[in-house]
Image (spheres, rainbow, N blue to C red):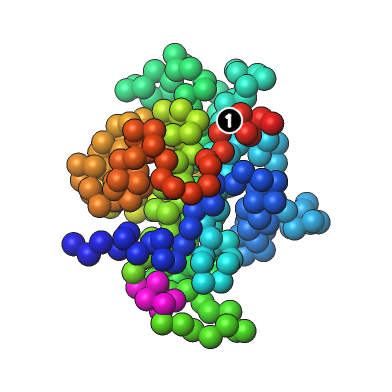
Amino acid sequence: MVDHFSKFDQFFEIVLASTEEQITQGQRLRFQVFSLERKIFNEDYYPAGIECDAYDGRSVHSILRHLATGQPAATVRLVLSDNNSPDEGFPLEKQLQCPLYFEDIDIRSLPRSSIAEISRFAISKQFRHRAPDECFGYYDTERRVSTPPDQPIKNQRVESRRSFPHISLGLLKAIVQMSAANNVQYWYAAMEPSLIRLLSSFGVQFHMLGPIIDYVGKRQPCIASVEKLLAGVAKERPDVWRFITDDGNLLRGQMAAGPEVPSRAAADS
């Protein structure tokens, strides 16, 4: 099997947002994707060109930056429990107007601080091969990157189009990093069935919570135990497991060299 992931760092970097400027970069990309490209959110609501909401203040954020251009290619946030109001619901719970239930996980007995919701998973149109199905926000199956008109195509960039076809897994790695830094043990998510199938092909298995709902489009509410999900990935796709866990270092609490991962304390400050 070709190891596409070994080349990832040649073309992209994960920026775990720890400054207001970095968070704003992600919010600008969200506005681009959700308002300008996909027309899901009314752009008139965001005159500054920044898509934000009340959950940003209790979230940690990541950006996937394309090294050749310096452009943010994708972004994702992880909505944490509310330290000031531990019983405050997550976005998905509020959408359903009730606590979620899954027979294999007693959600109601879990410490709220152990849960987070994957949210605002967005990939720039420039880095998508085609207009994707909307899921999580969005996912990517890109195999080429459009070159800005003022920049020549470089051999390295042509290689990047072939060598890393799944930007979404780069964002998943960022989610694992943020989860490790914040002791998150369970993920909520709302995904289209097409994304569930895509992730399953990489050994990433979420559990469905009830029927599909209308949640910024048709979405499947899901939950996953982070530990069990990663164990399943390790069994089915060890190459994917090595990539998204930094060869297991994240699971040992050892972060790879790079910027400090924002934590709950940083998000609250």
Question: Is residue 159 magenta-colored?
Answer: yes
Q: Quadrant of residue 90?
A: top right
Residue 236 x, y percent position in the rendering: 20, 45
Q: Which residues are magenta?
A: 156-162
Question: Is residue 114 magenta-colored?
Answer: no
Q: Looking at this rendering, what residue extends furthest in the top direction?
A: 109
Query: Who's the residue at 34% across and 69% down the image?
Result: 163
Q: Looking at this rendering, what residue extends furthest in the front direction?
A: 257
Query: Who's the residue at 35% across and 64% down the image?
Result: 7
Residue 171 x, y percent position in the rendering: 46, 51
Can residue 209 be seen in this snapshot? no
Q: Which residue is mark 1?
A: 264
As displayed, is residue 84 above or below residue 149?
above
Q: Secondary structure at mark 1?
A: helix
Residue 186 x, y percent position in the rendering: 42, 29
Can residue 1 be seen in this snapshot? yes
The amino acid type, in three-letter code, at marker 1 is: Arg
Closer-to-camera residue (187/14) = 14
